[in-house]
Amino acid sequence: MKLTPLAMTLALALGAAYSPAMAAKPSATAPAAKPFLWENATVYFLLTDRFNNAFTGNDLAYGRKADAGPLRGFMGGDLAGITSKINEGYFDSLGVTAIWLTPPVEQIHEGTDEGTGKSYGFHGYWAKDFTTVDANLGTENDFRNFVEAAHAHGIRVLLDVVMNQTGPVTETDYVWPDDWVRTGPQCTYKDAKTSIECTLVKNLPDFRTDSDTPVELPENLAAKWQREGRFEREVKELNEFFARTGYPRAPRYYLMKWHTDWIRKYGVDGFRADTVKHVEAKVWKELRTVADAAFDDWKRANPDKKLGDDKFYMTAEVFNYNIAQGQMFDLGGGQAFNYYQNGFNSLINFGLVYDAENDYESLFSAYSRQLHGGALDGYSVLNYLDSHDFDKPFDASRKKPFESANKLLLAPGAAQIYYGDETARKLDVAEAVGDAKLRSFMNWDELERNVERDGYKIAEVRAHWARIGLFRKAHVAVGAGVHQQLQAKPYVFKRTYDQGALHDKVVVALDLPTDKPAKIDLHGVFANGQKVKDYYSGKTAVVKGGGVTFGTRNATVLIGQE
C-alpha cells in the first residue's frame, strides 16, 4: 500500500508506531475489547472546523461570508475530515483512546462583532438548533460515519454539550422566548446567583434551567422544522420523551432530550459539559440520568457495536477548578458545590498549567496522593496544559514540547491533548486577538514538511508524544495507577494498578544521560529473568541483577511487560 507524504513522515519518525496497515479502511465491526479505563484515557480535543477539511463545498453554509476578524470565522474543517484522519490511523499512532469534539449542532448563521472583528460560531457554542448538524461541518450521516469510524478503531467519542446558553442574537438569528431564556443581567461572578441566574457576556441569552414551568416550542424553531420537513417527527419524539420520563416541559428537559438524542441515535460514549458552574448543580445530575438511559438503549440496540461494558462518562468544565480543591468548588459568597456528586466522573483540571512548573516528582506525587486515598479517591481529573479558551497555556511559545508531553501524558489522571500539542501548533498567532490566538488551523503543513523550530523538528515532537501515548494506551497503570518514586537521580518511578481482575505495573525513567546506554535499577518491580519492553525505543530485554539495559541512549525509557 502506498503511503501519503504525511504517513511517510510519521512512519520515519515513529518506526513501528505507524504502518501502512493503519491507513486501511477499518472493518465495520468493533475490535476486540482491550483494557480501558476513563481514568487513564488519552483524550484528543479538537475544534472540528479547525482540524481537517475533507470537502470545500460546505466551507461557507447558510450564506456565511469570509468577513470575520483574524481566526474568528469558519476555516473549513469538517466531520469527514476527522473521519479521514481516523481511517488514516493518525489517532491510533498517537495512542488516543477518546476524541472530544466541539458541539456539532447548527450554529447561528450570522456573525457578531465583539469589538475584535466579526465572529462566527465555528467553535460550536452558539447554538441555533440543537437537533441537527451544522452544514459547515457536514451532515448527520457524516456524524454517524465519524462515530462508527472511531468505534471501529476502539476510540470513544466525547460530545461537548451546552446547557447554559443559546447563540447570540443577530438580524437573522432570533432570540428565544422570554420563558426560555433571560437576556440579563450580566454575570458578576460573586456567588452562585451572580454566576448562574445571568448571562455570561452581553448578547448571550441564558437558558432558564432553574424553571419548572412548562413552555411551548419556540415559534421560530417550529417554523424551521416545518420548512425542513421534520416538524411532525421532532414533535412526536418530544411527546414520547415527556411521556416516558414524566418530566414537565420546562426548558432544561427539552435540552436534555436534544442532547441525549446524540447518544441514542449515534452511540456517543460520553459528554464534556460546558460552563458547568453557570448551571444549577442538580441539572447536571438530571442530565446524567437521562444520558445513562439513552446509552443503555443504544447498547441494547447495537450489541455488536459497543466497545465494552463501561458506563456513560461525563466530565465537567468548571472553569478554574484545580485538582488541589478536591471535590468542592467555591462559587463565592460561602457557596461551594460538589459536582462529582452531581453526575460527573471527572472534572477538567486547570491546575496542571501551573503545577507543570514544578519538578516531575512534586507534580506526580501530589496528584497521586489526591487521587489515591485523598479527596478524589474513586474519582478522576482530566488534565490539560492548554485549550481553546484558557488564556494562560503552559507553553504558549512552544519552547518546551518534550517536557509538555512528559508532564501531561505521565501525570496521574486522564490526559487531554489539545489538537496540535503533538505537533507544536502555535498558540500565540500574532494577528489574532484573545482566545482566537489558540484556535489556528491544525499545522498539517508543518508536519508534512517536518519544519524545524527552536532547535527541534516537528516530526520529532510528534514521535515523542506518540511513544508516550502508546505506552499509556498499553498500560492503564500510567494514568490510573498509584505513583511511587524509586530513584531521585536519574529520576525513576513506578506506577501500579491493582483493582479487581486488572493488574498492571510500569517503571519510567526520565532525564537519563544520553552519552551512553543507561542501566535502569528496577527496585524489584520486575524480577530477574522477566522480559520487559521499553515502549520508547521498542526494544526488549531480560531483567538481570535487578536492572535492565536496552542499549539505547534516549533520555526517556518507558518499561512494561507486553
Image (cartoon, helix red, strand yellow):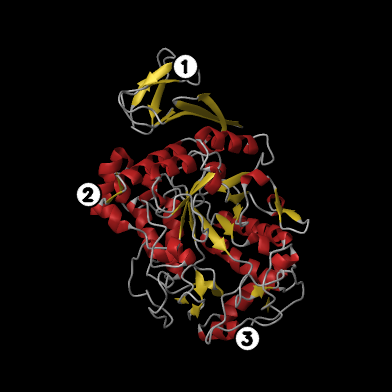
Q: Which residue is mark 3?
A: 219
Residue type for callout 3: Glu
As helix, strand or loop, the secondary structure at mark 2 comes to loop
Q: Is residue 110 above or below residue 87?
A: below
Residue visible at 66% across and 57% down?
288
- Quick check: can you spot residue 223? yes
335 to the left or right of 79: right
Residue type for callout 1: Ala
Residue visible at 38% across and 43% down?
466
Residue visible at 38% across and 47% down?
399
* Image depth: mark 2 or mark 3 in front: 3
Residue visible at 53% across and 60% down?
159
As helix, strand or loop, the secondary structure at mark 1 comes to loop
522 to the left or right of 453: right
Q: Which of the labelled discs sits on residue 527, or is there none?
A: 1
- Circle 3 Cα neighbour tier, 10 Å, few/some/many (<14 / 14–19 / ≥20): few
Q: Are marks 2 and 3 in contact (CB under 8 Å)?
A: no
Percent position (x, y) of residue 160?
54, 61
- Circle 2 Cα neighbour tier, 10 Å, few/some/many (<14 / 14–19 / ≥20): few
Percent position (x, y) of residue 353?
53, 48
* Image depth: mark 1 or mark 3 in front: 1
Distance CA(mark 2)–CA(mark 3)? 54 Å
Q: Are marks 1 and 2 in contact (CB under 8 Å)?
A: no
As helix, strand or loop, the secondary structure at mark 3 comes to helix
Q: Which of the labelled discs sits on residue 1, or is there none?
A: 2
The quarter holding residue 333 reads bottom right
Percent position (x, y) of residue 269?
54, 54
- Quick check: can you spot residue 79? no
